[in-house]
Image: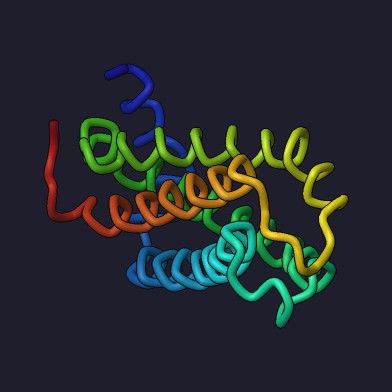
Amino acid sequence: MEAIQTWMSNTWINELVVGYAWSWPTLETLHFLGMCMLFGPIIIMDLRLLGFDRLAVPGTSVHALIPLTLAGFVINLTTGIMFLFGDPYRYVINISFQIKMVLVLLAGINAIYFWKSVEPILEKLGPHEDPPTLIKAVGLASLLMWTGVLAFGRLIPYLGTG
């Protein structure tokens, strides 16, 4: 792992991130905006899966938020990778960062499960039907995992290493 961290700290990405005074604050701002684009629609979608506002928010409106969510994820993935390259020795051993990455992975698996197994069930439901327990469980899991991603990401500077 040490060799990978050394390589990361010797790349042009590291130089871009730490070599200019405004790089890190700019990345932080973009990361925050990406987080808003990602987390805002996820809250709406997950709460709807849990059965909230079925009548007020049609499913097609919720699905229209997916491109915004994906754009936010791409922004956060890009800026997150740049943070990692900017300070690999700090992030790789940070327990909060490790937990955050596990939660991102689990949230991704949950999203794939949603699209493969839950979405077809959801499409068959009428607007007045209460979602089955499976759909609520997937929505609750997503909401909890993404909240964890947000919380542990914010705790990276405070929880320290290992």
What residue appears at the point 84 percent right and 68 percent down from the top-left corner?
60
Residue 21, above or below 159: below
Quarter where residue 68 is shown? bottom right
| In this rendering, position of residue 73 left or right of residue 104 | right
The answer to whether 150 appears left or right of 53 in the picture is: left
Q: How many numbered circles are shown?
A: 0
Instruction: Give the residue drawn at x 50%, y 34%.
Output: 105
Quadrant (top left/top right/bottom left/bottom right) for the C terminus: top left
Near-viewer residue (89 or 20) = 89
Residue drawn at x 28%, y 40% as measured from the top left: 91
Residue at image point 59% right, 44% down: 133
* Residue 39, x across and y down, in percent: 52, 64
Which is nearer the eye, 69 or 20?
A: 69
Residue 155 x %, y %:
22, 55
Q: Nearer the viewer, residue 88 or 93?
A: 93
Q: Residue furthest front?
A: 129
Task: Indicate how the structure is coloured in the image.
Answer: rainbow
Image location of residue 145, percent across then percent down: 43, 46
